[in-house]
């Protein structure tokens, strides 16, 4: 078998195709990763900025499942007809035919990070938006084009009552402190909270983890033999070493690593370094629990502790490989 290492993308906050959005949403959206930019047909990911008073009307996806993370700002989510408050750290998983919409009721921008699979929403947002350059003046509000319905088609949206639809996907709405959380051993320390996994969502598509790494600590070099991973930075700064190249990253940066791609992260700042990691297919929820210690939100951090003696076995069983294993796989896969 030939060397099957996946693709790599390290994107800074302003990287990506950006588009001003029409009323009633307004603001802008930046497509960070989509099949046109990244060699994967699994998903699209981006950041949507909704200004005060703007809204994403209530809708459902006919075919897609979507993960939304509140990065900053406040607002209201309407999920299956129920209003829920939005604040930084809220995560919403909307399966197909799940009705959801968002409005900004604050006085600052509401910023949402999204991952949607399969892709399509990325093309719709580009279709009815207007190209945006970073730093340019905000245009006057503008309505959707007359061809709005056709332009929206790739997103496979459905408006109105969808409560009678069958084959409905999962619906999860989690607050900032919800999820199974575990203190992590050195040299990483800090903690990891499993927000979404097959253990709490009836889906085999993703695992979503929020990981908090204290100043001076690091995630050691590793890879995943069968997973693609998207790591979005929500706070702090770090040096990311990805496939042998060092990058300085901070809030709004996105690192995408395919299978067998070696990556590590060193917190170089004075504050916690926080990331939202999305794994496709699911991975690592078992490892984080096996090497960690149960954590309750708000409790003081324990003294640093070491990894279990059988860490190698735990890693292999949970789709994590170390640099020597990556190198060995590359050698074995080389043409004879």
Image (cartoon, helix red, strand yellow):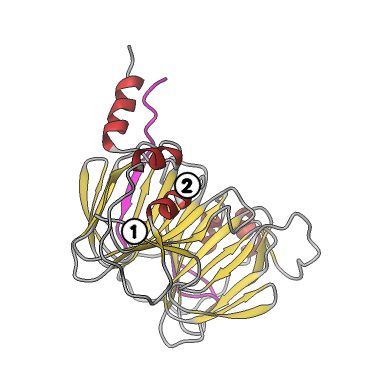
SS assignment for the magenta stretch, majority:
loop
What residue is rendered at 34% in x and 58% in y?
A: 184
Residue 280 relative to residue 10: left or right: right
Q: Which mark is residue 283?
A: 2
**Could you tell me which secondary element the residue under label 2 belongs to?**
loop
Categorize mark 2 by other alpha carbons within 10 Å: few (<14), some (14-19), many (20+): many
Which quadrant would the N terminus be assigned to in this image? top left
Q: Residue sitting at 59 percent across and 48 percent down?
A: 204
Q: Which residue is mark 1?
A: 184
Point out the image quarter for the C terminus. Answer: top left
Q: Earlier in the sequence, mark 2 or mark 1?
A: 1
- Given residues 259 and 104, the one toward you in this image is 259
Q: Nearer the viewer, residue 55 or 97?
A: 97
Label 1 SS: loop
- Vertical order, 303 against 143 (above or below): above
Using the rendered image of the protein, determine whether residue 56 is visible from the camera's viewpoint: no
- Find residue 145 and report its horizontal and vertical position in percent: 59, 67
């Amino acid at each position: 078998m030939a060397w099957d290492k996946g693709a790599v993308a390290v994107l800074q906050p302003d990287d990506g195709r950006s588009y001003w959005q029409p009323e009633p949403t307004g603001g802008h959206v930046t497509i960070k990763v989509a099949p046109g930019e990244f060699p994967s047909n699994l998903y699209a990911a981006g950041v949507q900025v909704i200004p005060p008073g703007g809204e994403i009307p209530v809708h459902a996806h006919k075919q897609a499942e979507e993960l939304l993370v509140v990065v900053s700002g406040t607002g209201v989510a309407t999920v299956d007809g129920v209003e829920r408050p939005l604040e930084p750290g809220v995560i919403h998983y909307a399966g197909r035919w799940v009705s959801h919409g968002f409005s900004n009721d604050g006085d600052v921008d509401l910023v949402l990070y999204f991952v949607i699979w399969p892709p399509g929403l990325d093309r719709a947002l580009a279709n009815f938006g207007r190209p945006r350059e970073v730093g340019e003046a905000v245009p006057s509000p503008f309505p959707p084009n007359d061809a709005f319905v056709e332009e929206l088609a790739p997103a496979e949206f459905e408006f109105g009552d969808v409560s009678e639809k069958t084959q409905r996907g999962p619906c999860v709405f989690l607050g900032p402190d919800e999820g199974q959380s575990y203190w992590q051993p050195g040299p990483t320390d800090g903690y990891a909270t499993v927000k979404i996994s097959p253990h709490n969502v009836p889906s085999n598509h993703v695992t979503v983890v929020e990981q908090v790494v204290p100043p001076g600590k690091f995630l050691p070099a590793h890879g995943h033999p069968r997973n693609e991973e998207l790591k979005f930075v929500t706070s702090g700064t770090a040096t990311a070493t990805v496939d042998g190249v060092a990058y300085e990253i901070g809030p709004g940066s996105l690192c995408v690593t395919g299978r067998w791609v070696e990556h590590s992260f060193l917190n170089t700042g004075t504050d916690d370094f926080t990331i939202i990691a999305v794994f496709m297919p699911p991975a690592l929820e078992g490892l984080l629990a096996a090497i960690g210690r149960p954590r309750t939100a708000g409790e003081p951090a324990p003294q640093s502790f070491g990894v279990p003696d059988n860490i190698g076995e735990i890693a292999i069983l949970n789709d994590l490989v170390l640099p020597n294993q990556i190198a060995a796989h590359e050698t074995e896969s080389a043409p004879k």
